[in-house]
Image: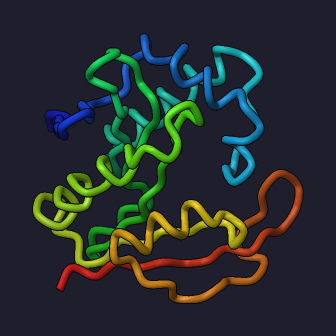
Amino acid sequence: MIYPVLETERLLLRQLAPDDAEDLFEYFSLDEVMEYYDLETFKTLEDAQKIIRHFNHEFEKGKGFRWALELKSERKVIGTCGYHNWHREHSRAEIGYELNPKFWRNSYMKEAILPILTFGFESMMLHRVDAFIDPSNISSEKLLLSLNFKDEGTLRDYFFEKGRFVDAKIFGLINE
């Protein structure tokens, strides 16, 4: 399957490439980005290269898509967004995303997620999209609510991350 390329006014959404490692390392190496992520803060460029390989391997295995969010004006990757835990038999997948803090509060992630949701519902034939977030990640909660996701509750000690159990708020969006 050819990786789908999506485009918005300011962003080119495309497959991650090895050359994107420096852009990803720029923000994956920041504690403020990794606070709510299930990985440790990146220490080396190799960490960024590994996650690019991981995201692309998941696509090759048919388990999901993770788009690079390339800022057209700078030809720079400022984040990623996409689907994982794709369960075809249940017509659902989980969405995940992160963004370089230099670009926070400029609606880039909402701009990226809208065509990704359209792709999920129309091309992947999803009926439901899930999002799990840390209950204290207010910015992510506001983003999901602005995209019409519904808060479906808090799952106590749902994930084991960075040596401890953490709660997860689940949000869902149904293709009606």
Residue 98 vertical placement versus 85 (above, below): above
| Residue that lies at the very extreme toward the left in this rendered image | 122
Residue 160 vertical placement versus 12 (above, below): below
The picture places residue 147, in percent across and down from the top left corner, at 34, 69
Q: Does residue 4 appear left or right of residue 154 in this picture?
A: left
Q: Please name whichever residue, 30 or 156, is drawn nearer the observer in this view of the structure.
A: 30
Q: Does residue 142 appear left or right of residue 153 in this picture?
A: left
Task: Name the residue: 55% across, 62% down.
Answer: 140
Task: Name the residue: 61% across, 21% down.
Answer: 26
The picture places residue 94, in percent across and down from the top left corner, at 43, 64
Quarter occupied by residue 113: bottom left
Q: Does residue 24 appear left or right of residue 95 in this picture?
A: right
Residue 105 vertical placement versus 125 (above, below): above
In what quadrant of the picture does the C terminus appear? bottom left
| Residue that lies at the very extreme toward the front in this rendered image | 106
Task: Name the residue: 66% across, 63% down.
Answer: 137
Q: Does residue 137 appear left or right of residue 93 in this picture?
A: right
Quarter occupied by residue 144: bottom left
In what quadrant of the picture does the N terminus appear? top left
Task: Name the residue: 58% across, 60% down.
Answer: 139
Q: Give the colour scheme of this rendering.
A: rainbow
The picture places residue 19, in percent across and down from the top left corner, at 42, 11
Report the number of numbered marks. 0
